[in-house]
Image (cartoon, rainbow, N blue to C red):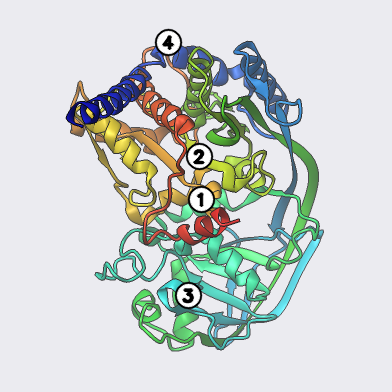
Amino acid sequence: MKVQSLSVLSVILFFAIASCNKYAEQSGKISENDVKNYLSVIANDSLQGRKPFTVGEDKTIRYLSDEFKKLGLEPANKGSYFQDVPMVEVTSKPAGDLKLSGKSNLSLKPYTDFVAGSRQELETINIQNSPLVFAGYGIVAPEYQWNDYAGLDVKGKTVIVLVNDPGFKSNDPSLFHGDTMTYYGRWTYKYEEAARQGAAGVLIIHQTEPASYPWHVVNNSFSGAKLYLQQSDKHMSRCKVEGWITEEASTKLLAAAGITGDFRALARKKGFKAIPLNTSMSLVLNNKLKYSTSHNVAALIKGTKRPDECVIYSAHWDHFGKGKPDAKGDSIYNGAVDNGTGTAALLSMAKAFSKSEKPERSILFLAVTGEEQGLLGSEYYAAHPLFPLNKTVADLNMDALHPFGETTDVAVTGKGQNELEDYVEDIVEENGKHTIGDTKPGAGSYYRSDHFNFAKVGVPALDINTGIESVLHGADWGKAQSKSYNDDNYHQPSDNFSLIKDYGGITQIANILYQIGWKLGNETTFPGWKNGSEFKAVRDKSMKN
């Protein structure tokens, strides 16, 4: 009996060691040269900034599909590398001031005091004498026993709401997620919930700390042309007006209704009830509409044993195209870091998989459009998936990987969400390094790239990046490099490719994600969401179907 037991144990041990060795062999599959070579093309002026609906899009998606084809990857969408993403471009322009009448009689100036637009596909949006209501944070969250709309009828009214959620700077870690933003804190959620409640309009009060960006970012990002996915109802189910109002203007508005002091503290009190402001709003918007189709690019390595199950690697290929020349005369937004790096890593990943043993599950390489316009390509894919969502194991996303060299830390966006993070921990610790979470958890970074749209439909989604502790230069240097990029190059024409930058950190992240994808591709289990994640219930429900 002892001999037989030892024999069984030996067999088990043999396969365990073989599996570990096979896993370990997957490290270092992606080279820095591959990343640089792909990036030098993706961030080249010839692609004209990779904006959807332009010649830059045509050139970009053709380059991606050609490269996938060269690597021997199959077209993933019924014989095509492309997934059509129908969009509408809406350019909303206020016809004049936003007029407030009643307790508060004010004329708010466009862009100075407020920014507003509409998704409704009408040439003119006319909202007259819409009563204003301060609806706190504008949140309905049953799992937190929270409902700012309780007992409130907002049909025909415009709600004024706060950005972020009640937990932020509350000094109460048990209130929502404390200083870590939940999806309920994102501006996108505020718009969605106001529409569900039937409001005519929604204006978010801007405050720099809870928003995590100053007013000029709002002004730049929420004015001018915006792309949206086409909807059969032409977005008539959305509020007529969606926008932001400055803290200064909102302070005057709320003060006229007797609301003074810290209105964030007021709105986070248990039992808070929405407050009518006894003021009405009038505004006219003129819209220009343009319809066209952009494209996701999708390529496949088919699994050998469970081809109906897939692991997704995603990265957005788009950027801002051409704009006004900067001080150096450069008008092309090449987006080398954002997100040429992620797209280059995606191609490098595909190359590594094409040269390796095929996994048991399928691997889908998905380059999505319209991220810079509101995560549109990934939203469309999530609504029209090429694999059933309950057969989609995970999404491993790559966005804005930094060319500052290798780091001793690896940054996990929204750390604490799902079990994919455990895979990262295992790999990082084996190499004597460690992981960190968001340095600014209140900014809600987990909800600001394409992985979020997979999370919304329940698919465990991971987004990681280089940390700040440079292997060669230390943490202070790494912080300075990150600050310099954010201050000087983020969403600017100066985000260009350079041969002298250190792409070792990008390669480091790509190899970690490669190992995770390879392991997931050969497992039979599905990773899940951790307790406390707002996405766990969606996944649990879908996996029962």
| Residue type for callout 4 | Asn
Task: Work out how far the residue at label 3 is from the one at label 4, CA to CA, in angstroms.
Answer: 50 Å
Q: Along the horizontal axis of the image, is 172 left or right of 287?
A: left
- Observer-nearest of 494 and 40: 40
Q: In this view of the protein, can residue 408 be seen by the observer?
A: no
Q: Position of residue 340 (x, y in %)?
A: 51, 26
Q: Position of residue 57 (x, y in %)?
A: 69, 28
Q: Earlier in the sequence, mark 1 or mark 4?
A: 4
Mark 1 vs mark 4, foreground winner is 1
Q: Indicate the amino acid at tag 1.
A: Ala
Dot 4 falls on a residue whose secondary structure is helix
Secondary structure, mark 3, is helix
Q: In the rendered image, which residue does mark 2 sit on?
A: 395
The reply to whether dot 1 and dot 4 touch (C-beta < 8 Å) is: no
- The numbered mark at residue 455 is 1
Q: Give the mark nearest the N terminus, 3 or 4.
A: 4
Report the quarter where the N terminus lies: top left
Amino acid on which disc 2 is placed: Asp
Q: Amino acid type of disc 3? A: Pro
Residue where numbered disc 4 is placed: 33
Looking at the figure, which quarter contains the C terminus?
Answer: bottom right
Sequence-first disc among 4 and 2: 4
- Residue at point 29%, 47% (across, down): 439
Name the residue: 54% across, 81% down.
Answer: 149
The answer to whether any part of residue 437 appears in the image is yes
Task: Of the two numbered discs 3 and 2 on the same chain, state the one appearing first in sequence.
Answer: 3
Choose the circle earlier in sequence order: 3 or 1: 3
Label 2 crowd (10 A; few <14 / some 14-19 / many >=20): many
Q: Which residue is mark 3?
A: 142
C-alpha gap between disc 3 and disc 1: 19 Å
Judging depth in this view, the residue of 144 and 538 nearest the camera is 538
Q: Residue at the spot x=49%, y=41% of the render? A: 394
